[in-house]
Amino acid sequence: MPGKVASPERRVPRHYAGGVAIDLHTHSTASDGTEAPSVVVERAVEAGLTTVALTDHDTTLGWAQASDAARAHGIRLVPGIEVSCSRWGKSIHLLAYLPDPDDADLVADLARARVSRDTRLDRMVALMAADGIPVTLESVRAEVEDGATAGRPHIADALVTAGVVDHRDEAFAQWLGNDSPYYVSHYAPDPVRAIGLVRAAGGVPVIAHPWSCTRGRVVGDALVEELAGAGLAGLEVHHRDHTPQDVRHLTALARSLDLLVTGSSDYHGEGKLNRLGENTTAPEVLEAIVGLASGAAVVEP
């Protein structure tokens, strides 16, 4: 595949204590990652992780394959979902750990989001093709695994495959960003509703990369306080999109609201520069998440 990202020199994970390294945010071909769920697990073992979470966008499609791989490779797996949310037209991502994958209300809302993502893809491709950008719906569909959650990265992949750009990042910079004339929104629940759905399904909700510089600061302190009152359990503080100043502020905010502090890579395979284990979660935080959950179970090696 053109435009592969060279892996940087491996770093010791932030919370690599007592031989435990925990990464709670990764993506596979079940959504917009470039590696199958089983391969993500294999890469996690190679990176020295002892626990990894699979958190594909709006789907549990990869859980079964990842679970089999985790048992085979002797690594702990935390099944999860990254739920797409929206408030005032701004995208907010909610990591849902260990929800019941058969909960009717959660399943219905995730299905609605995936259908909306799918039709949104059609509209974006039509707008781009009308302006002469060499992309077709057929070429984009060819990049999406059967049953996977479709997204803008698949348009980027089609452009990479066609040799129009060298990497996803280039496609997003030119045509696929939120400020692009080709951007089309999709259904995403308000985060308060999403937190309620996740909690009702026995899951544990944590806001992903709340101050990501790539999205603008859309999750301010007041919203975090509101979401904490609605049942939010934690903040993903340690993330490559957060500056040291962001980390200090978010850590203090989490402490003031009695929220858990997590960290992770947000790994997408070749789709992003993010490397497994570049940020991790403390063991006691994972145990707190497990203690709060009553839906799915952690897959033990």
Image (cartoon, grey):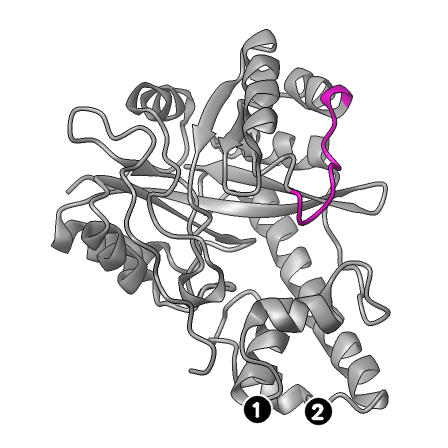
Q: What residue does disc 2 label?
A: 134
Q: Is residue 258 magenta?
A: no
Whether residue 213 sits left or right of residue 292 in the image: it is right
Residue 151 seen by the camera: no
User: In the figure, 163 relative to 88: above or below?
Assistant: below
Q: Residue at x 22, y 58 (%)?
A: 42
Whether residue 260 sits left or right of residue 178 in the image: it is left
For the residues labelled 2 and 1, the Cα–Cα distance comes to 8 Å
Question: Given the image, on which type of amino acid does mark 1 rest?
Answer: Ala
Is there a contact, CB below 8 Å, between mark 2 and mark 1?
A: yes
Q: Principal SS element in the magenta part?
A: loop
Image quadrant of residue 29?
A: bottom left
Q: Which residues are magenta?
A: 213-222
User: In the figure, 244 relative to 166: above or below?
Assistant: above
Q: Residue at x 68, y 90 (%)?
A: 136
User: Which type of secondary structure does the marked residue at label 2 adopt?
Assistant: loop
Q: What residue does disc 1 label?
A: 162
How crowded is the residue under tag 2: few (<14 C-alpha within 10 Å), some, or many (20+)? some
How crowded is the residue under tag 1: few (<14 C-alpha within 10 Å), some, or many (20+)? some
What percent of the width, then of the height, locates residue 219? 72, 32
Q: Residue at x 41, y 37 (%)?
A: 98
Question: Given the image, on which type of amino acid does mark 2 rest?
Answer: Pro
User: In the figure, 162 relative to 20: above or below?
Assistant: below
